[in-house]
Image (cartoon, rainbow, N blue to C red):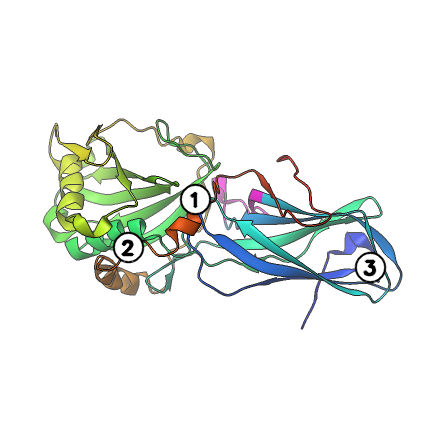
Amino acid sequence: MVFKRVLGSLGVGGPVVDTILDREPVRPGGVVRGHVRLRGGGSACVLEHLALELVAGVEAGHGGEEHEGGVVFDRLRLGGGFRLDAGEHRDIPFTIHIPWETPLTEVSGQPLGVVLGVRVELAAAGTKDHGDPEPLIVHPLPVQEAVLGALGRLGFGLVAADLRLAHIAGTGQRLPFHQEIELTPAPQYIHDVNEIALTLLTGPAGMEVVLEADKRGGGSGAHGRHTVRHERLEQRDWTGEVDSWIRSLVEPRATHTARDDRTGAVIAGVAGVTAGTAAGGAVGGGVVAAGLGDALGNLEDLGHLAGLGDLDNLERLTGSEGSGGTKDLGGPGSEKESRG
């Protein structure tokens, strides 16, 4: 095992640390398991603080500036106040619940250009520093697969998936950023729009779908917002439903509405949603990843929902709020810590 040395502020010969994750696929609202492996340096030291952070890597921020370290969007305190002897090896297991709004990093096996990681924060001798992030791979939930699969069958193309440091007004968004998936129009809409922007905000009960159309001819953009639940996905005509959402965006003065028959709530098909991008612009993942065209072709397969009615592992997922903030490991030496 190659240890990742905590950065030099802890001193030459200080402790080294490695974060080791179980390599099971993870979905928004799920859990990540692993352990932190510590090795004592040339002399004993007291570790005052040990925590895990979920980080969204920032490739380019507002104005194209580089942002070192990324955006921390969740934390788990593992403990502290214990002695690590010279050369001592110690493993600390953890289970961290990731927020429901955690961005997707892959669709149909293709990377989206979004970089997420789990990193250690360690404090000793009054100095705090971070280890190297361990990459976190996040796959879509079934309800996200249903919408993405329908878009693939309709002929939309996947361009990029950016993280935007902004809040979408009128939604239940809880993280400081949201993921915006950019799509080229399907052939039947090629004369109406230049691009469709899609945001999927998931939670324990379901998902908010936010759509924005960049219309051709210099017209103002149109917005739509819809809600869907996790249950009974296989009983819905996703291709027809998603197509109706798109039509409500591109048709002049559209008055379409969408009804969620499980909640009885009527949601306007065209709703004013403020993107709020003035607050920060693109945060990360703004690079068009190679192979996204292949991912688009594979989106068609995501829409086949037979057998998804029981939503494998969803019962476990809904046991976690996963909405940000700090969780407690629950083991010896662990304690809750408020977000800084």
Q: Point out the frontmost of discs 2 and 3.
A: 3
Q: How many marks?
A: 3
Q: Earlier in the sequence, mark 2 or mark 3?
A: 3
Q: Residue at x 41, y 34 (%)?
A: 173
Residue 276 vs 241, above or below: the answer is above
In x, y percent, where is residue 131?
67, 56
Residue 286 visible to an observer of this rendering: no
How far is disc 3 from disc 1 in space, using C-alphas? 36 Å
Question: Is 66 covered by the magenta stretch?
Answer: yes
Task: Please tell me which residue lies in front, 142 or 138.
Answer: 142
Report the span colored magenta: 60-74
Per the image, the residue denoted by label 3 is 14
Quadrant where the C terminus lies? top right
Q: Looking at numbered disc 2 in the image, what kind of residue is underneath it? A: Leu
Provide residue 165's location: percent of width, then percent of height.
46, 37
- Which image quarter holds the N terminus? bottom right
Question: SS at mark 1?
Answer: loop
Tag shown at residue 158: 2
Horizontally, residue 89 falls left or right of residue 177, namely: right
Check the image and report above or below for 68 versus 219: below
* Sequence-earlier tag: 3 or 1: 3
Q: Amino acid at mark 1?
A: Trp
**Residue 100: image tag:** 1
Q: Nearer the viewer, mark 3 or mark 1?
A: 1
Does the rendering let one see residue 84? yes
